[in-house]
Each structure stands twice: as structure tokens, then as C-alpha cells.
Image (cartoon, helix red, strand yellow):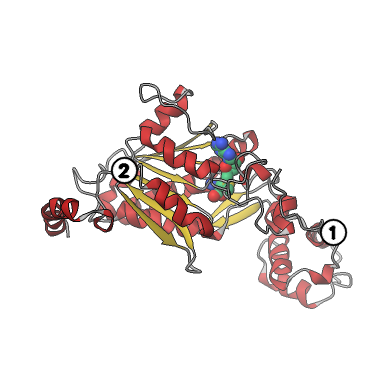
Amino acid sequence: MIPICKPPRPKKKALEDIPFHEYKAILSYVLDGDQNEIIKMYTSNIFSYDGDDKKTIEQKKKILEYAKRRATGEALQYILGEVNFFGYDYKTRKGVFIPRPETESMIDHFLHAIGSKYYNTKDYFWKKEHLKILDLCTGSGVVALTIGNEFLRWGKMGSHKGSFSTASIIGIDKSDAAIELANENKDLYKRVNVKFEKLAIPEELQKIKNNTLENEKLSKIISEADAIIANPPYVPRDSFVTEEVLYNEPHDALFSGNPDADDNGMTLAKSIIYHSQFSRARMLFMECHDQNADELSKFAKKYFDGVYIRKDYGRRKRYLQCYRGFRNLRNLNLKEFLAQLPRQLLQKMLYK
Ligand SMILES: C[S@@+](CC[C@H](N)C(=O)[O-])C[C@H]1O[C@@H](n2cnc3c(N)ncnc32)[C@H](O)[C@@H]1O
């Protein structure tokens, strides 16, 4: 078995060791954002803070309880039960992966690509009306819901001629806890046209019979998608994972594949690329580990016409952007390049 690089269990820290911004987040949560109270409570010692009405006593108790839980290493997002992602508030809970800022950056790239004028032509990339978006490994559903929320916002602003507001989104995940939480998050944003389904993507690359996967429901959902986005578990088992992540979050959301085989965290990522060949999707966006981006990009070139590696805010190679039905000029040999050129130029002139 490949040993997970396992740091020791977090030691109980003193309350004073909680970072300033986390303590402030706890105060803000319990005191409901009341700035005067936050400043008063923060500048006085919490034990000697002299508000003694029933409400203040309750709040003091809560703040101490949360701070103690944080001091023992519990993730702040689980303690507060909420997270802000791409400007939207979502619920979080132990047992489900905590959404990360780097996934916000992937959504940024995704929205930029799907909304781009150049790519949205009638017969070029995808039709704009009634688009079907598939979010694989949806977890708490934040990716699917954020894309839906942004489409609604575009509609309200009147940008993109409002056409994306007719899109529907499906999020799938193999975890019951994740799908339950995703549905609770959906209740917070009832206007988003999103559905969550409990389905597992096979980790092994299945033999394809009549263009159908063994699981017919999954096969249908994948085949009907116009664009796919995924944040699969991709942590290499022997890479360093902080104690906080390792002892808080579900390992199924971090690692994939057989623990006995060294797959460098690419089993599910490769399976997603491979199984996308059943899909009519013209675009696949996937988050990955920076050390795997080059290998996954090479693998994806077998199934897609164009593959780009996108970077996060820290300039690390973190996302694959794969296209079908469009030849990435950089991937072509001279003959293919010359054959593509008139079409490319025409597209550019027409849809500038
Ligand atoms: C890294 S988390 C991503 C969650 C969410 N998309 C986000 O960005 O916050 C990966 C998710 O993949 C799910 N997962 C792992 N293996 C899976 C499989 N074979 N099929 C479907 N979902 C899987 C886990 O349950 C987990 O929720």
C-alpha cells in the first residue's frame, strides 16, 4: 500500500493561537455581523467582557465553544457550517469536501470560455439555448450552483442576450452525504435550474459497448452534456497533505484509485477524460494537481481535438481545458494546419 504522507494528529492549541482572522470570523458569525459588538468583544478579554444580559452570556458561551473546537484542529468552515464561494454563501458540513478558492478560479476560466463571443457560434462550439452542463464530482454542489447563479446574473444584466438562463445543470457524486448537502444548497438558490444525482464514475476505463457505459443512467447523462466541468479527487498519495485536511475531510474526496498502486492521483481524472468520449460535449474543464497537468494533457489529446493547460492565481498548472470539434492550431502538423486555416480565419472574421 502506498503510505499516505501522514502528519501526526493536530495537538490541542491554546485559544490564543487561533489566527486573528479566524477569531474575527467566529465573532462575526455569532454576533451576526454587528460591528460595534465585534469590536467591543474583540478588544476586551472575552472572559471579562461585561455584557451580562442573557443574549450576551449565550453568545460568549458559543464563541468559547467554537474557539475551543477550532483550537483542536476542526476546520473553521465545518464549525460555522458555511462558506463563501465565488461571492455566494453555501452550507458546509463534516463528511463533505470544503470548497477551495482554486476551484473558483477554474469557474472563472470556464465562464470566460463558455461565454466567449468567438466560441459561441451556431455550428462552431455549442448552441447557446438549453445548454446542458454536467458537474462531475459535485460535492456540496457549489460548482454547479455557482455556474447556474452566474448564468442567472448574466440574464439579469442582459449580457450574452440572456440565452444562458435557459441552461440546465446536473451535478453527480458518489457520496450520499455530498448529494444531501448539495440538495440543501440548492434550496438556498431555488431559481437555479440544477439537479443532483447520486452516481459513481467508474475508476477503471471500461470497455465501451454500443457507445454505452455499464451504468446506463450515467451513460445517458454524460452523452447528453454540452459541456463538462469536474473537480475530482486528485491528491497523489505520497504528497504532503496538511494535518488539517487529512483529519477533517473525507478521503474519498482527496484520493482516488487503488491504494496499492501508485497512480499519482490520476485514476479518476483519466477516467473522466476517457469516459467523456461518450459525450457530445465540446468542452471539458477539469481541476488537477500541478505535477500531473502535463501527463493528463497528453492523455487528453487522444480524446479531444485541442487541449490547453490553464494556470491558477499562483501561476501553477492546475486546470485542463479540452475542446472537441475545434482543432487547436498549436497541436496540428503542417498539413492539418493548412487545411484548417481558411475555416479558422473565416470564423475569426465573422465572429469577432
Ligand atoms: C475534490 S471533491 C470536489 C467537490 C466539489 N466539486 C468542490 O469543488 O468543492 C471530489 C468529490 O468527488 C467525489 N467522488 C470521488 N470519487 C468519485 C466517483 N468515483 N464518482 C463520483 N464522485 C466521486 C467525492 O465524494 C467528492 O465529493
The residue that mark 1 highlights is 61
Task: Give the amino acid type for the residue marked by disc 1 in the picture.
Answer: Lys
Q: Is residue 190 visible from the viewing direction of this image?
A: no
Q: Is residue 304 above or below residue 35?
A: above
Location of residue 269 in the rendering, given as x and y in whole percent from the top left corner: 50, 44
**Badge 2 element:** loop
Of the numbered discs in the image, which one, if any, rests on residue 233? none
First reached walking from the N terminus: tag 1 or tag 2: 1
Residue at 31% x, 43% y: name it: 282
Query: Residue 317 versus residue 122: which sits nearer the camera?
Result: 317
Q: Quadrant of residue 194?
A: top left
Residue 334, compared with residue 316, is above or below; it is above
Q: Residue, x 64% and y 42% (percent of image)?
A: 252
Q: Position of residue 283 (x, y in %)?
A: 34, 46
Dividing the picture into quadrants, the one containing residue 61 is bottom right
Q: Secondary structure at mark 1?
A: helix
Number of other residues with Cα within 10 Å of mark 1, as a class: few under 14, some 14 to 19, many 20 or more: some
Residue 34 horizontal/vertical position (percent): 67, 67
Amino acid type for the residue under numbered disc 2? Arg
Splitting the image into four quadrants, where does ligand 1 fall? Answer: top right
How far is the residue under mark 1 from the one under mark 2?
54 Å
Kindly identify the residue that appears in the image at 51 percent across and 55 percent down. 292
In the picture of the structure, the residue carrying the numbered disc 2 is 282
- Residue 193 x, y percent position in the rendering: 42, 39
